[in-house]
């Protein structure tokens, strides 16, 4: 079982020990670390007190590792090498940006425009994570997230509104053999409806009655079913705009309804600028925002 992080020695003390152990000299370690010899000796003493172990034998001319100190040095050297390799890896690929989006947003808005993004920012590698889960920016190593949420964000997050949910009912033109849309809401019962996990049909129809139909856990699946002529889907206009313009889907009713919450661009605030992340953030604000 791993030691709880709060019980680990301070990183500065571990670093002082690792360098002094390699050099077998507080003076040489101080030169490498850019601190005083006394500071290195103090950090090592604090580490020994924390561990309850003597790590060095203090000799008239330099240092010698104790048995426990030699064993500990091997592990600490390996640990710092791992951290160094991880740091080098992330710094050597600064143009990677990870963006977390809902599956429907990914499929219907972001992915169709990836070529535009890469053309405007050559060299950037965008990694897309499609998930309904709320991102933990540190744990999930996410730079930017796009989420359906209300305008209440903690101080450590920066957010920009992209667009509201303007709901529109759509279907394949192949579904209508005897009459052409737009239809009246009263005619809805003549056709199969497609229900996603949000199920805004009662709000759209202004009814408390339970509406039944094929149910999908993601809006993108309901839209795909509509494209296949399986029924009428209710979706955010931004997700079906291209299909409507291409004639693959048609608005079924003249009515649209705007519901909360809205789609937001979110990222963790940072005092250290990240030009690549900033560039993708700015592109998303400019290209994905709808009035």
Image (tube, grey):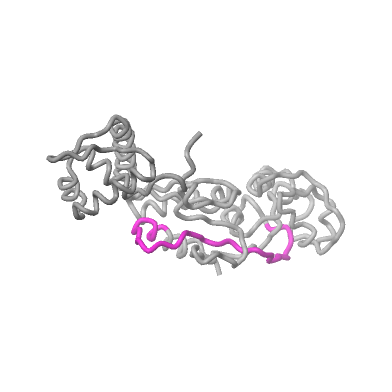
The quadrant of the rendering that contains the C terminus is: bottom right
Residue found farthest to the front: 60
- Res 150 → quadrant: bottom right
Q: Which residue occupies 38% across, 60% down? A: 278
Q: Which residue occupies 29% across, 36% down? A: 77
65 horizontally vs 282: left or right = left
**How many marks do you count on the picture?**
0
* x, y percent for residue 16: 27, 46
Q: Does the magenta portion include 191?
A: no
* x, y percent for residue 67: 29, 29
Q: Nearer the viewer, residue 197 or 111?
A: 197
Residue found farthest to the right: 209
Examine the rendered structure and indicate whether residue 57 appears above or below residue 142. above
Residue found farthest to the bottom: 291
Q: Nearer the viewer, residue 188 or 22?
A: 22
Examine the rendered structure and indicate whether residue 34 appears above or below residue 287. above
Examine the rendered structure and indicate whether residue 193 appears above or below residue 163. above
Magenta stretch: give its range.
Answer: 251-280
Q: Nearer the viewer, residue 182 or 227?
A: 227
Q: Which residue occupies 27% across, 32% down? A: 66
* x, y percent for residue 226: 69, 47
Q: Which residue occupies 70% across, 51% down? A: 171
Q: Does the magenta portion include 260?
A: yes
205 horizontally vs 152: left or right = right
* x, y percent for residue 216: 71, 44
């Amino acid at each position: 079982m791993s030691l709880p992080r709060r019980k680990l020695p301070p990183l500065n003390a571990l670093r002082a020990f690792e360098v002094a152990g390699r050099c077998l000299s507080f003076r040489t370690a101080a030169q490498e670390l850019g601190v005083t010899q006394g500071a290195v000796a103090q950090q090592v003493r604090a580490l020994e007190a924390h561990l309850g172990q003597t790590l060095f034998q203090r000799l008239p001319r330099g240092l010698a590792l104790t048995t426990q100190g030699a064993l500990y040095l091997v592990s600490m050297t390996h640990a710092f090498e791992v951290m160094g390799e991880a740091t080098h890896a992330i710094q050597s690929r600064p143009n990677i940006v990870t963006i977390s989006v809902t599956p429907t947003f990914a499929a219907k808005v972001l992915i169709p425009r990836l070529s535009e993004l890469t053309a405007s920012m050559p060299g950037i590698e965008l990694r897309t994570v499609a998930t309904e889960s709320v991102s933990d920016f540190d744990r999930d190593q996410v730079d930017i997230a796009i989420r359906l949420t209300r305008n209440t964000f903690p101080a450590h997050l920066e957010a920009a509104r992209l667009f509201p949910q303007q709901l529109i009912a759509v279907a394949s033109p192949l579904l209508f053999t005897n009459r052409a849309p737009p239809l009246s809401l009263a005619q809805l019962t003549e056709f199969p409806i497609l229900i996603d996990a949000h199920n805004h049909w009662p709000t759209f129809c202004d009814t408390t009655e339970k509406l039944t139909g094929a149910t999908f856990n993601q809006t993108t699946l309901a839209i795909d079913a509509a494209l296949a002529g399986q029924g009428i889907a209710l979706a955010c206009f931004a997700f079906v705009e291209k299909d409507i313009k291409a004639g693959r889907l048609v608005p079924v009713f003249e009515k649209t309804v705007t519901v909360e919450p809205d789609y937001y661009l979110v990222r963790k605030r940072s005092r250290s600028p990240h030009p690549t992340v900033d560039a993708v953030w700015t592109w998303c604000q400019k290209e994905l925002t709808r009035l």
